Image (cartoon, rainbow, N blue to C red):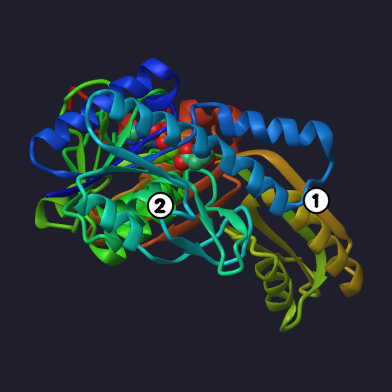
């Protein structure tokens, strides 16, 4: 088989951990498999580099940010390759560029356009374990890009798709995908398998165990993904196509996201075209808008438009919204970043009613106020004050029967 193994930050967090990764890679090769390894930077490294940038510049260019951030993965790639060689297995390390990972030119959140895998394929055919730096690529113009936080997951899935790999294993610091973050709710249960759709919702709603775009990619290209621990040999969670068993479960998981800022453009004229203009402007800046709420005032003449964006984009979104508000003669723009989004996800919601009401009831019973709601076929999300995050996750997890003993 051809297996892609991705190791996250904790799994390559120090030289001893890297040696443990090398041991696992070599064991996999000795079982007769071809192995491509994708590594993240050591845990904390990317955050450290971001802090450094902030210490020398109030507004670093995104191009230089990407050059900076891509260095973390270079280090672990080279070290992992060395550690594998040390065990007597041929290995070779590639940067994203050397591995042929070609992206668009949107710095800090580039999209992979294609992978020119000749070099990787040749190395595999020559008996090498190939180690590739995650999270990074290169544009047609030879500019270094990164794929957004957590982007090594995407590197792994995309490489697995390009090489037509039999399996993409995501090695991390928990045993698999749980009903909610096991580091917040010890009662969380590991799932044996989960559908791409549910995983996509959980990831986009904050479960950082897999990067959202990696799940999207896996779903589109039908890449079988297994999430498992690099610290033991437990079986992990298979992310795969939906089956009938999965539909019986109403709520498969609970997710939370504290990385949300809510902007409110106050008293905009209530007439056609305003929302389109606002959200076009935001979209052109490559900012992803999530929950949107519009309230028309009692006199029917003006409206408040609220929307959420990732906190990292809130400054830019505020600038844009402010400018538009001035143009439109709106009253101003208000920002809050002390909010969190709590979500329940499950394909079974398609065929069960009353799930949203049960969620609202549970939150209200615990005194948690809901500030905005958004729903899709298989999820319900509520915006609440961030200080209630852990409480809300715990009570919803229990309410929907997800605790271990159930
Ligand atoms: P890596 O560095 O290996 O990429 P991440 O920190 O990005 O690891 O993701 C793993 C973390 O995701 C876990 O430590 C856990 O706290 C968090 N997490 C959030 N939601 C879930 C969930 N539903 N199942 C498992 N882990 C989750
Ligand atoms: N090192 C990058 C990050 O911390 C990418 C990754 O770990 O997947 O976001
Ligand atoms: Mg990650």
Q: How many marks?
A: 2
Secondary structure under badge 1? Answer: strand
User: Farthest residue toward the top?
Assistant: 16
Q: Is residue 306 left or right of residue 181?
A: right
Find residue 7 and report its image quarter: top left
Q: Is residue 319 left or right of residue 360?
A: right
Q: Could you say which disc has been placed on residue 138 in the image?
A: none
Q: Position of residue 5 (x, y in %)?
A: 27, 41
Q: Is residue 190 left or right of residue 103?
A: left
Q: Is residue 177 above or below residue 187?
A: below
Find residue 282 and report its image quarter: bottom right
User: Label 2 crowding class (10 Å Cα cut-off): few <14, some 14-19, many 20+?
Assistant: many
Viewer-proximal residue, 244 or 368?
Answer: 244
Name the residue beneath numbered marker 1: 334
Q: Position of residue 153 (x, y in %)?
A: 39, 46
Q: Position of residue 342 (x, y in %)?
A: 48, 41
User: Is residue 165 in sight in this rendering?
Assistant: yes
Name the residue beneath numbered marker 2: 154
Secondary structure under badge 2? Answer: helix
At x 44% / y 45%, what residue is drawn?
134
Q: CA distance from mark 2 to mark 1?
A: 34 Å
Mark 2 vs mark 1: in front: 2
The answer to whether the beta carbon of the residue marked 1 is less than 8 Å from any atom of ligand 1 is: no
């Amino acid at each position: 088989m051809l297996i892609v193994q991705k190791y996250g930050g904790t799994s390559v967090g120090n030289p001893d951990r890297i040696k443990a990764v090398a041991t696992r890679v070599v064991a996999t090769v000795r079982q007769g498999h071809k192995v491509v390894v994708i590594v993240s930077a050591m845990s904390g490294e990317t955050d450290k580099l971001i802090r450094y940038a902030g210490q020398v510049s109030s507004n670093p260019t995104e191009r230089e940010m990407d050059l900076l951030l891509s260095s973390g993965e270079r280090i672990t790639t080279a070290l992992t390759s060395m550690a594998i060689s040390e065990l007597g297995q041929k290995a070779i390390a590639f940067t994203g560029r050397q591995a042929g990972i070609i992206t668009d030119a949107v710095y800090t959140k580039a999209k992979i356009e294609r992978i020119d895998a000749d070099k990787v394929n040749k190395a595999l055919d020559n008996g090498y374990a190939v180690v590739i730096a995650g999270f990074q690529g290169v544009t047609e113009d030879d500019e270094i890009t990164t794929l957004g936080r957590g982007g090594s997951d995407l590197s792994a899935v995309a490489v697995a798709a390009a090489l037509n790999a039999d399996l993409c294993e995501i090695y991390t610091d928990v045993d698999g995908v749980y009903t909610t973050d096991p580091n917040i709710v010890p009662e969380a249960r590991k799932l044996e398998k989960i559908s791409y759709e549910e995983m996509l919702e959980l990831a986009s709603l904050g479960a950082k165990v897999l990067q959202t775009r990696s799940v999207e990619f896996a779903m589109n290209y039908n890449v079988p993904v297994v999430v498992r621990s690099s610290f033991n040999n437990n079986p992990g969670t298979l992310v795969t196509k939906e089956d009938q068993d999965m539909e019986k479960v109403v709520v498969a998981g609970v997710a939370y996201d504290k990385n949300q800022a809510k902007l409110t453009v106050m008293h905009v004229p209530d007439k056609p075209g305003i929302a389109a203009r606002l959200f076009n402007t935001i979209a052109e800046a490559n900012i992803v808008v999530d929950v949107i709420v519009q309230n028309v005032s009692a006199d029917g003449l003006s409206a408040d438009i609220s929307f959420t964006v990732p906190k990292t984009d809130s400054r830019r979104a505020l600038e844009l919204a402010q400018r538009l508000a001035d143009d439109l003669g709106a009253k101003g723009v208000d920002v809050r970043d002390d909010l969190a989004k709590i979500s329940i996800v499950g394909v079974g919601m398609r065929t069960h009613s009353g799930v949203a009401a049960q969620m609202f009831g549970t939150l209200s019973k615990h005194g948690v106020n809901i500030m905005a709601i958004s729903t899709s076929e298989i999820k319900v999300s509520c915006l609440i004050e961030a200080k209630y995050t852990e409480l809300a996750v715990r009570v919803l997890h229990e309410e929907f029967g997800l605790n271990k003993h159930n």
